[in-house]
Amino acid sequence: MHQKSRVQNEVGILTLASAAFHHIKPTVVPRVFGWGGTSAAPEHMGWILEESMPGVPLVEAFRSMSLEQKKGILAQMVALLKGLQSYELPESIRGWGGVTFDDNGAIVSAAMTTVGAGPWSSFEDSFRARLKIALAKADKSPHLQGWRPNGVRKRVDAFIEQGLAAQFDGFTSKHDRAIIHADFTTDNLLYDPVTGHITALLDYDFASIMHPAYEFFRSFSGNGGQLTGWLGDTTIQEKESAAIRNAKLSGQFPSPLPAPVPSENGPGLDWELAQAWEDELQKLDAKRPSTMQGVDRVANVDEILGALVPWRLANEDFLRMNADEDTIMALRRIGERQLVSLLDHVGF
């Protein structure tokens, strides 16, 4: 996280979210009682004093709920999502990225705190800049070496210069913007176990102003709602991921639903939960992948962005605990195969 406007961004987004949820009583957004931004002095870290919200963490309880109980939670999550999507942003927010306060106290566009760059004039420009930032990080990694071995870097550069714009050509809603929480999962929800009502949506640290699709790229990982880019079509698991992705993109799930395909990493995808999420999105006519023409290609761009700096090869803590050279080289090969397959898929 980039500290310069981290606090200002979170307080600004909390202010916007509170306005977006003004119709929900009691409020699910913590009130801010005081805050201070980070100063130039390293010992002066930013801070926020905010309301302690009622309720208990939802994440563990959600896993053990029946499907009907989960549907009740999903309906409330969609209502919150719809509120964020429907809120009319102040005219002072003109770009894509983070927010801060100007000298008059108005909320204005600023750098995206998870990146340390921006704001940008379009969703496409945000990805162009972030792809280049990711490559700069890869250049500094002794394990990634900027993806220059085996000619991969030339292909990435060609994609950015010659292919990126085409991925947005058919994205008909590309000018839309909304408040994006970017970590909207059951981990960041509190609820009342007696009534089953969500009582708080917490942790706006990653929040920004982006296209509504970005919420589906970054959130909903625990409730079957996250949209990935193309992940392959060779293994059974890849084919299952492709099938559920196509269902989300079309808004039409097969009947009967496929049986989950278990793997060494878990029990397989939860088709029932994913369909329940889609059903709730449709009930409130929330913006969703199936209503965003061309979002599949933008999701592929986001997948390439993530593949440029695999977290296991960029996270210092992970590397410190897994210093074995053979392990690191194996991860490097896996990362290169994934990146190359994505470039193949988009024609570069």
Image (spheres, rainbow, N blue to C red):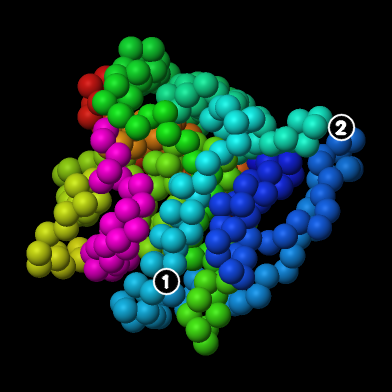
Who's the residue at 60% across and 36% down the image? 90
Residue 281 in percent (x, y) is at: 33, 57
Give the residue at x 25% y 46%: 290
| Residue identifier under label 1 | 73
What segment is highlighted magenta in the picture? 266-294
Residue 86 in the image: above or below residue 174: below
- Most foreground residue, 193 or 46: 193
Residue type, mark 1 in image: Ile
Could you give the CA–CA distance between mark 1 and mark 2, rounded to whole angstroms? 43 Å
Q: Secondary structure at mark 2?
A: loop
Q: Residues within 10 Å of mark 1 (few under 14, many from 20)?
A: many
Location of residue 55 in the rendering, given as x and y in whole percent from the top left corner:
61, 77
Q: Amino acid at mark 2?
A: Ala
Q: Quadrant of the C terminus?
A: top left
Give 321 or 302, whichever is nearer the viewer. 302
Residue at image position (44%, 67%) is 76
